Amino acid sequence: MARRDLLGLPSAWMSRLVRRPRIASGLGVAPAVSWLTLFFVIPMIVMLVYSFWRVEHMRIVRGFTLQNYYEALTNPLLAQSFLLSLRIAVVTVVATAIIAYPFAYFLAKRAGRFKLVAMLLVIIPYWTSFILRTYAWKLLLGNQGILNSTLQYLGLRSEPITAFLYSPTATAIGLIYVFLPLMVLPLFNSLEGIQDSLLDAAADLGARPWRTFVEVTLPLSLPGLSVGSVFVFIFSLGEFVIPRLLGGGKSLLVAQAIYLEFETKADWAMGSAMSMILMLVTLVLLGIVGRRVKIERII
């Protein structure tokens, strides 16, 4: 009887796999590839096909057409929702970069023995439900929330500020809070790789701290900043839950517009076309950053 290893496979099979690393590596990634193919690639192909069809009287008409893409790009309401999503995503990227950079620098260069604790403070919020954290911001920003109540108690306001909640501002605040770790972690990895000797050399040559930052620290940390910016931008651009809960549906964003096409209008063809446009924007951004930055060195 053939000898078997701990996995129950014949030893002869295992010896062949060891001698053929390509087969062994292929078997190792097969489950992940199968999962991605079944739950990502195939649904995206189906959606791509739907985007070239049309809907008439709530029924799909199978026939090639580019009308959905034309309407998605020329409809003023849809164009406005896409531009608003772009604006909020850009604001989110800039704000997260401004907030994350000092914290990431502290983690990389000044935290010392407290580095692990500080890192946990960044990650711990992800252990809590995403929806619960978003609802917490509703309690903070609401008319009777902590922020408005504090302003009224201090006499700075006689009535609550309604713009805090159910507005693009509230949406941007929620996005900044939720996606801040996506900016901190790549920046931390990039800053930690900067040798202290370079900073010391700049100081020895008479460079002030701000000049050292502009000419040494910032250029060397650009890969992490670029990767973090792309992550935050992509997730912010396609986010649905936060704009729905904090924005209150008063400002139509692209994810909400896609939801309306699928669920309210039952126009799966138009919704698919809009989803493909959003996917194309995402792929273009990833392609641009992938050509300029070695992402595998940052994450």
Image (cartoon, grey):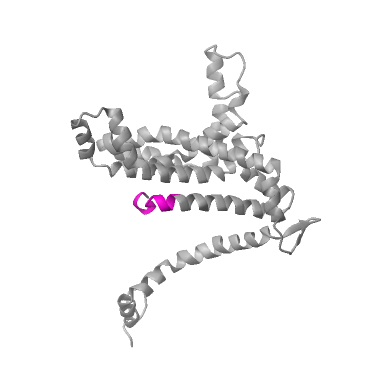
Q: Is residue 274 above or below residue 5?
A: above
As drawn, is 16 to the left or to the right of 73? left
View extreme (bottom): residue: 1
Q: Nearer the viewer, residue 189 or 245?
A: 189
Question: Where does residue 105 sit, x and y in percent of width and height?
Answer: 32, 35
Query: What residue span does the magenta drawing correspond to?
Result: 289-298
Q: Is residue 140 above or below residue 238?
A: above
Any part of residue 158 in sight: yes
Q: Is the magenta region chiefly helix, strand or loop?
A: helix
As drawn, is 109 to the left or to the right of 276? left
- Does the segment drawn in magenta span residue 188? no
Quadrant (top left/top right/bottom left/bottom right) for the N terminus:
bottom left
Q: Residue at (36%, 32%) from the top-left corner?
A: 102
Q: Nearer the viewer, residue 119 or 218?
A: 218
Question: Where does residue 145 sit, x and y in percent of width and height?
Answer: 57, 25
Where residue 107 sits, quadrant-wise, is top left
Q: Nearer the viewer, residue 221 or 202?
A: 202
Q: Residue at (58%, 64%) from the top-left corner?
A: 42
Q: Residue at (18%, 31%) from the top-left corner?
A: 204
